[in-house]
Amino acid sequence: MTTLVKTGTSQIHFLTGSDEAAVKKAATALAGELAPEADVFGLEAIDGALDSVDEAVDCVQRTIQALLTLPFLGGSKLVWLKNASFLADSVVGRSESVIEALQRLCEVVGSGLPDGVNFLLSAPFADKRRAAFKSLSRLASTQVHDLPDVGYRGGEEAIVEWTAVRLHERNLQLDPDAVEILAARVGLGTTQLESELEKLETAFGTARQITAEEVRLLVPQTREGGIFDLSRAIEKRNLPLALETLDQLFYQRESAIGILLAAIVPTVRNLLLAKDLLTRHRLPPPAQPHLLAGTLKRLPAEATSHLPRKKDGSLNLYALGIAATHATHFSLAELKEGFAACANANQQLLSGFPADKVILARLLIELLARKTS
């Protein structure tokens, strides 16, 4: 999460960003500071979470009227336009009527508010390209709470770190695997994350460490979470968990080819690459995934030229680091055979025989069952 603060006039406050939960939390805290113990005359809150153009225009007009109305009995008051959805890039937000109404609001704010009147505008997802955003950012004390920009399939580490920060803020203790599972199941859904953290705190409190199994039991399974669980089960060579997760993914109507290509093949490939790298260069497995980066920097460029990369051309070190920490569960020969087995399973899925679930279950057994001598 990135929070930027710009200082404008002390009477006007603008909070926005793609991190909806952070915007709402910060706005609530700021409203408490600006209008402590405010009565009905000291705080005028106007709900801006609206679905139609007419409602949005009326909301802006009511806000302008509230800003121009002097405080009761010469005191002070806070006008809070909260959760204003019509500043976003939406059908309502693009309406000419709404744009004109917001322009009038900016003109009123820019001309100066009456003494004793404070204005707080909280608007998650406000479109930064719009004139209203630029005007408010210039006029107001502005906070922008944005989610981390993690890109596509290369930002697992950033999501885990972002989740860990939220856990620390609540003083919740989760073991490392539990943090990764929570991050995989919730992703960057800030509102859902707040709900799940509330649930975990209610169930287990903050005095002890919450386990991965407890997170699995309480946090709803999603497609992304199931793919993550299957990948981690393969890495840890946990056949029962892998088969259980496979059942869950089929129950969620995931396609067999999707499961194979999104979870099984990338995981086995990373394990094979990591095992080959560690074996070829006689490297010890890293204690933590992020430590692999330092090790690879000491190798010549040709030793890492074949490794998977992100869109920007940099190495996808987090996924490879996770694989490297678990590579000791497999021999290099097992992983080579396993990667070939993945190709064979792909051909079987394309042929339609035997049943998809049987093909993937057999593949997992072949990959993860301990070989007896």
Image: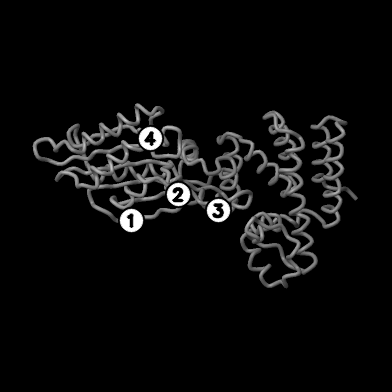
Precedes in sequence: disc 1 or disc 4: 1
Mark linked to residue 126: none
First-in-chain label (3 vs 4): 4
Q: Are marks 1 and 2 in contact (CB under 8 Å)?
A: no
* Whole-number angstrom distance, CA of label 2 to CA of label 4: 27 Å
Compare marks 1 and 2 and give the one earlier in the sequence: 1
Query: What residue is drawn where x is 61% and y is 60%?
Result: 290
Residue marked by disc 2: 146
Give the CA distance from mark 3 to mark 4. Answer: 38 Å
Instruction: Looking at the picture, tell me which residue is in the foreground, 48 or 112.
Output: 112
Q: Is residue 256 above or below residue 331?
A: above
Name the secondary structure under disc 1: strand
Q: Earlier in the sequence, mark 2 or mark 3?
A: 2
Whether the residues at callouts 2 and 4 have beta carbons within 8 Å, the answer is no
Q: Which residue is mark 4?
A: 96
Q: CA distance from mark 1 to mark 2?
A: 15 Å
**Can you tell which of label 1 and label 3 is closer to the viewer?**
1
Q: Residues within 10 Å of mark 1 (few under 14, many from 20)?
A: some
- For the residues marked 1 and 4, what is the alpha-carbon distance in whole angstroms? 28 Å
Label 4 near label 3: C-beta < 8 Å?
no
**Which residue type carries mark 1?**
Lys
- Could you tell which of marks 1 and 3 lies nearer the N-terminus? 1
- Mark 2, Cα crowd under 10 Å, few <14 / some 14-19 / many 20+, is some
| Residue at (35% x, 44% y) in the render | 132
